Image (spheres, grey):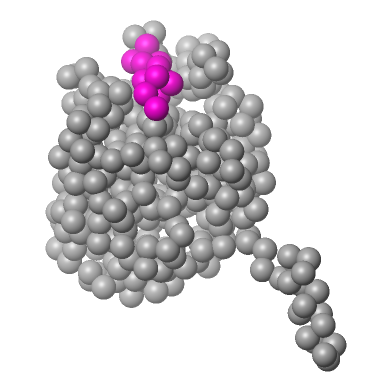
Amino acid sequence: MNKTGFLFLLLICFGLGFSPASAQELKVEGQFFTLNGKPFDMWGVRVASASQSEEYTRNLIKNLDDYKSVGINTISVFVQGSSGGYSDPFAENGKTIDKKHLKRLKQIIKACSKKEMVVIVGIFYQRTVRDPEIGNLKSEQAIRNAVRTVTKELKPFNNIIINIANEQNSGYYKDFKAFNFNDPQNIIGLCKEVKQTDSNRIVGAGGYHDSSNVVIGKSEFVDVLLFDTFSGDIEKGHDSGWHYNFFKAQGVPEKPIVNVEIFGGWTGQFTPQGVYPDEAKKIHWNEIEAAKTQPGLFVHFHSNTWFQGAGQDFENRFDLGGKGTPYDPGVRWYFQKIMEEN
């Protein structure tokens, strides 16, 4: 054996040659998650615009230790952003991503992996897709290419879930004529693209339209149902637990069901930034109770005015702040409740 062959053999024997970029391994086991073979009780927060700038990425990463200290073990980020800042980093054909943006996204994933945290990586955001002045993707093929590109670029990471589209039932997508995001079968088709590119990748999708969520959730190509709630759910008294029961009753099989954005734009009313009345806190705490009592249900905190503040002329905040009062604004009160209940 020559020297090159001997060195190659050593690399294999000591496991140094093909180590993944992420040492963590997230799996779906029935309706639950495991991380590194241990049960993973997901508690998340939506920080959807975190990869949109160096400043946002830096501010998120420096707060991850604080997140972990209050029980946050999962974050949700979108490639195309959110109301807190959005852009289209894809090339027109969808086959490449802006290098600086991709670097930031990978920095977030790596930082989370080191802390045994999971990242739900969303791809499409409706305001980006619909705007021809911002969106670069102009065809169905470009959309499919973009899904493949994200999947390929993130293949080395084992601590992520891919979320196809933000609120797939949003009316904003109707302005994009090349691809019907509102059709759940089309969303399932994009989940297939993920599986064809990386058969081991956990992928999910959904929105805030119950019947569409049922179709998506029943698909064999969807590992996780990723849904949202909105203001109409507040009016009807439909918390995440109600939706969980509905999805189950409609035949969604044993798989994790995750509300990745509790209450959506409804949270935009809480101003000054980071100030929540007691009644609003109680509504949020009901979500915690639902997730704790219904196996396979997980919820992610969302705040339009805090983590996506730029959409309402505030700054995007990535720290947790405090008790949600005028003298101590923030969202820490929500996560402290999770810790108290554990």
Residue 279: x and y, percent?
A: 34, 9
Q: Which residue is found at the position 53% from the left and 47% from the top?
A: 26
Q: Where is residue 281, by image quadrant?
A: top left
Q: Compare residues 218 and 73 and report the one nearer the observer.
A: 218
* Up-down relation of residue 75 to residue 271 (above or below): below
**Is 10 displayed left or right of 251 in the figure?**
right
Q: Is residue 28 above or below residue 153?
A: above
Between 80 and 200, the one lying in front of the other is 200
Answer above or below: position of 282 versus 171: above
Residue at x 23%, y 34% (from the top left corner): 247
* The furthest residue to the bottom: 2
Q: Number of marks in the image?
A: 0
* Image spot of residue 131 (x, y percent): 24, 58
Q: Is residue 247 left or right of residue 204?
A: left
Query: Which quarter shows the C terminus?
Result: top right
Tell me if residue 315 can be seen.
no
Q: Is residue 28 magenta?
A: no
Q: Say which quarter of the image contains residue 61.
A: top right
Magenta span: chief secondary structure: helix
Q: Position of residue 157 (x, y in %)?
A: 56, 57
In the image, which residues are magenta? 282-295
Q: Is residue 100 left or right of residue 184?
A: right
Q: Residue at x 19, y 52 (%)?
A: 184
| Outermost residue toward the right in this view | 3
